[in-house]
Image (tube, rainbow, N blue to C red):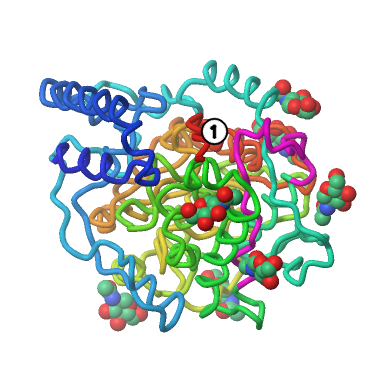
């Protein structure tokens, strides 16, 4: 099992154009040696799969897949008649074994190493994070390909001059925050990364492009910048990134192979087992429904009279299973029709709020739950959760495998008041990392994304003659 993940990992590592391949001999040999060493390590210890202390470790990601699979019609349903060129995993995935910890998080009962939720901290390692953050904040520079207001596609390429709204606001907020941040440089020679500023959400609604034209637009955009500027060719796009929140982003880059294979994709629909997303190369963008109020209400656990809450369209087998199992429950409130109370009230009245995979692994519900101080319960197998290499999700959420839906009530009622109080206070601590601001604020969602990009910056540059 571990071997196949490593193959997957090695195969999907950044590839640079053929002419550069010979330069990769040494790193490849090193990588091979390291892989062999790690394989040996895996075979000699089983606690690896329950340990979460390996910051930045690729292995951190390997523990996430669990033995569950389900049919998903994401692409077809989400984007209509597009060819399904990167289907989600349909066939059963072998289980990592009984020690595997689904979703990288545990039920808050003591685990094999005796840790309880009360021992968990919000950051994997807050010291390393703070130290790196300061370095990142002082030195990180981004070059944005420049476009004029008069460009016919200014609406797609420039930051919006209004407050972004709706389900996919994260994409617009990122661009706006970047534009208003100190990370921008006009001098490409000092840039760490290059930003491809096209907005996939806006292309989708632009009648000149539309869903059917996005792939060609992006191919042409990359053609244009790689002919007009020397930067793309130096790395085959490996020091470039784009940002997209709509799930169409996954196929939008299908005609621009180098974008898919080399560039850093900062996307909301970040799932393992999806042909276009590579967790160690790409980065998960939190999907956040923007809220203008500055102070989210603080409602304590004793004021939350309902155990758990979900509302949403039943558009996936996982949601079907949730509703089928719990629609009559008086403790676990699941709504597939319109709500009797307001959505916000329900989030404030509940101890736990479900995020359940729909068409894609991501929805705005995690952000909604955090904002309202409700502990998220995440049922979305293979979701590469936002900032998972920085934040310790099991300190502020409950991650549950689809297979465990029938045990939900037992799991949630098994959480003691003290454990819940700790989870909820961590929710209040992390929610600032899941907020956007037009002018970015330290440690907000924008800065966290910058930190993830900084971790992924590369230093290989080759001048082709
Ligand atoms: C990050 O940089 C900005 C701009 O220089 C500065 O205002 C802010 O205090 C810095 N944050 C930290 C944590 O150093
Ligand atoms: C982008 O940044 C420029 C220069 O700082 C500023 O003049 C402009 O108003 C910003 N645009 C938006 C939409 O925030
Ligand atoms: C590429 O450049 C051409 C010529 O400048 C321009 O007409 C076209 O709109 C550009 N396409 C994209 C996608 O940027
Ligand atoms: C980048 O590479 C392409 C394809 O090899 C080539 O056509 C183009 O001229 C190069 N761009 C620059 C700026 O040299
Ligand atoms: C749920 O309640 C409905 C009537 O309200 C009943 O017909 C149905 O059998 C119940 N389902 C389960 C699984 O208990
Ligand atoms: C809403 O739910 C409450 C409690 O379940 C119930 O008493 C009330 O009649 C419901 N209102 C509507 C409009 O259905
Ligand atoms: C809510 O709780 C957070 C975290 O404890 C605190 O920082 C914030 O000031 C509180 N807000 C209000 C309105 O009490």
407, above or below 420, in the image: below
Say which residue appears at 65% left-offset and 29% top-offset: 140
Say which residue appears at 69% left-offset and 47% top-offset: 144
45, above or below 142, in the image: above
In the image: residue 87, left or right of residue 219: left
Task: Tell me if the residue at label 1 has its CB under 8 Å from ligand 7.
Answer: no
In the image: residue 93, left or right of residue 334: left
157 or 443: nearer the eye? 157
Q: Is residue 333 inside the magenta stretch?
A: no
Say which residue appears at 25% left-offset and 69% top-offset: 71
284, above or below 58, in the image: below
236 or 173: nearer the eye? 236
Magenta residues, as a range?
179-203
357, above or below 270, in the image: below
Residue 104 visible in the displayed image:
yes
Specify few, some or many for label 1: CA neighbours under 10 Å numbering under 14, 14-19, or 20 or more. Answer: many
Query: What secondary structure is marked by label 1?
Result: helix
Q: Is residue 202 inside the magenta stretch?
A: yes
**Residue 429 at what x, y percent from top left?**
60, 33
302 or 325: nearer the eye? 325
In the image: residue 315, left or right of residue 246: left
Q: How many numbered discs, if any?
A: 1
* Quadrant that contains the N terminus: top left
Residue 342 visible in the displayed image:
no
**Residue 343 at what x, y percent from top left?**
60, 65
**Residue 151 at what x, y percent from top left?**
78, 67
Q: Quadrant of residue 346?
A: bottom right
Mark 1 sits on what residue? 426
**Residue 331 at what x, y percent from top left?**
41, 58
Say which residue appears at 81% left-offset and 61% top-offset: 162
């Amino acid at each position: 099992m571990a071997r196949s993940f490593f193959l997957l990992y090695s195969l999907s590592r950044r590839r640079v154009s053929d002419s550069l391949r010979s330069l990769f001999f040494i790193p490849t040999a090193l990588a091979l040696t390291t892989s062999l060493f790690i394989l040996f390590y895996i075979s000699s210890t089983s606690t690896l799969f329950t340990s979460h202390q390996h910051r930045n470790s690729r292995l951190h990601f390997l523990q996430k897949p669990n033995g569950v699979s389900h049919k998903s019609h994401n692409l077809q349903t989400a984007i209509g008649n597009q060819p399904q060129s990167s289907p989600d995993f349909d066939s059963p995935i072998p289980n990592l074994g009984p020690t595997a910890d689904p979703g990288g998080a545990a039920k808050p009962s003591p685990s094999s190493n005796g840790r309880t939720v009360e021992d968990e901290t919000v950051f994997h390692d807050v010291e390393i994070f703070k130290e790196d953050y300061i370095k990142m904040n002082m030195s990180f520079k981004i070059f944005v390909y420049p476009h004029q207001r008069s460009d016919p596609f200014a609406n797609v390429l420039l930051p919006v001059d209004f407050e972004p709204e709706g389900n996919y606001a994260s994409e617009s907020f990122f661009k706006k925050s970047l534009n208003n941040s100190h990370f921008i440089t006009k001098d490409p020679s000092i840039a760490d990364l290059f930003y491809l500023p096209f907005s996939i959400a806006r292309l989708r609604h632009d009648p000149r492009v539309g869903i059917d034209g996005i792939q060609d637009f992006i191919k042409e955009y990359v053609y244009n910048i790689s002919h007009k500027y020397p930067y793309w060719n130096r790395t085959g796009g490996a020091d470039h990134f784009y940002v997209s929140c709509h799930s169409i982003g996954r196929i939008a880059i299908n005609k621009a192979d180098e974008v898919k294979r080399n560039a850093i994709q900062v996307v909301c629909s970040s799932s393992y087992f999806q042909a276009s997303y590579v967790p160690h190369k790409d980065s998960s963008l939190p999907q956040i429904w923007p809220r203008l109020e500055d102070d989210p209400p603080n409602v304590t656990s004793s004021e939350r009279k309902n155990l758990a809450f979900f509302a949403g369209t039943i558009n996936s087998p996982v949601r079907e299973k949730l509703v089928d199992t719990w629609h009559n429950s008086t403790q676990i409130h699941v709504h597939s029709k319109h709500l009797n109370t307001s959505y916000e009230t329900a989030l404030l009245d509940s101890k736990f709020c479900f995020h359940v995979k729909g068409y894609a692994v991501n929805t705005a519900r995690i952000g909604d739950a955090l904002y309202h101080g409700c502990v998220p319960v995440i049922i979305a197998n293979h979701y590469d959760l936002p900032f998972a290499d920085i934040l310790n999700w099991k300190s502020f959420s409950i991650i549950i495998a689809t297979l465990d839906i029938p045990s939900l009530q037992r799991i949630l009622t098994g959480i003691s008041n003290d454990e819940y109080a700790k989870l909820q206070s961590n929710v209040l601590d992390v929610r600032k990392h899941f907020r956007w601001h037009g002018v970015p604020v330290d440690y907000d969602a924008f800065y966290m994304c910058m930190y993830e990009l900084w971790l992924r910056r590369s230093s290989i540059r080759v001048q082709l003659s």
